[in-house]
Image (cartoon, rainbow, N blue to C red):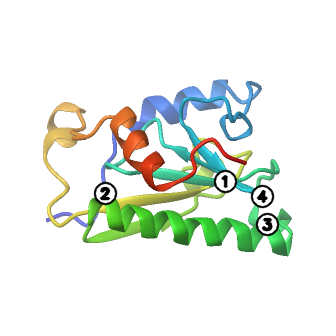
């Protein structure tokens, strides 16, 4: 078994995002079909290019590119929402674990490096397979629409 996580399908997305730096920030648009809900300081989105079922993105409302730019209140609001979303995903999907983290800066793998955000990725034993390596194809067994419907039953989606 390899110690390397391969995600070759991400290359096209990351490469195209370099050319789209001047376009509107996806985390500043609560009209997006991917937007789930907002609190006073944080917004939560579905990931349009998920690594796994249930992949969520949590971002501060204020447009900042580094965690050092967050106020103490924004920092705590961000991580409070990460914990709440993780708990809800645990209840809804019963994963065996989670990857939770941030990529700060383009060199670290951030496809959107101008507005920080936290990835919450549910993981299951055996959730990796050969499809991405052999055929550059991902198998995600749940649509974003279905995931949004399930999450919105637990959350106050669309509420500020």
Q: Is residue 9 visible?
A: no
Mark with earlier residue (2, 4): 2
The local secondary structure at tag 4 comes to loop
| Left or right position of 118 against 40 | left
- Which residue: 21% across, 39% down? 139
Q: Is residue 66 visible?
A: yes
Q: In the rendered image, which residue does mark 1 sit on?
A: 59
Mark with earlier residue (1, 3): 1
Q: CA distance from mark 1 to mark 4?
A: 9 Å
Please tell me in which quadrant of the rendered image residue 24 appears.
top right
Q: Position of residue 159 (x, y in %)?
A: 67, 46
- Which residue: 27% across, 40% down? 142
Q: CA distance from mark 2 to mark 4?
A: 33 Å
- Which residue: 39% across, 61% down? 89
Judging depth in this view, the residue of 80 and 120 nearest the camera is 80
Q: Position of residue 46 (x, y in %)?
A: 49, 43
Mark with earlier residue (3, 4): 4
| Left or right position of 135 against 98 | left
The numbered disc on residue 74 is: 3
Marks 4 and 3: in contact by CB < 8 Å? yes
Marks 2 and 1: in contact by CB < 8 Å? no
Q: In the rendered image, which residue does mark 4 sit on?
A: 41
Mark with earlier residue (2, 3): 2
Q: CA distance from mark 3 to mark 4?
A: 6 Å
The numbered disc on residue 5 is: 2
Marks 4 and 1: in contact by CB < 8 Å? no
Please tell me in which quadrant of the rendered image residue 18 appears.
top right
Mark with earlier residue (1, 4): 4
User: Which circle, 1 or 2, is nearer the viewer?
Assistant: 1
């Amino acid at each position: 078994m390899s110690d390397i996580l391969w995600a070759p399908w991400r290359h096209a997305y990351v490469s195209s995002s370099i050319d789209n730096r001047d376009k509107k920030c996806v985390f500043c648009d609560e009209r997006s079909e991917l937007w789930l809900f907002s609190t006073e300081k944080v917004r939560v989105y579905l990931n349009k290019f998920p690594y796994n079922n249930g992949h969520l993105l949590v971002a501060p409302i204020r447009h900042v590119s580094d965690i050092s730019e967050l106020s103490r209140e924004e920092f705590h609001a961000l991580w409070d929402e990460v914990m709440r979303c993780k708990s809800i995903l645990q209840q809804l999907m019963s994963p065996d674990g989670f990857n939770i983290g941030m990529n700060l800066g383009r060199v670290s793998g951030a496809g959107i490096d101008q507005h920080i955000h936290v990835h919450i990725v549910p993981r299951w034993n055996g959730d990796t397979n050969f499809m991405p390596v052999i055929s550059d194809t991902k198998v995600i067994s749940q649509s974003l629409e279905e995931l949004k419907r399930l999450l919105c039953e637990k959350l106050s989606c669309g509420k500020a």
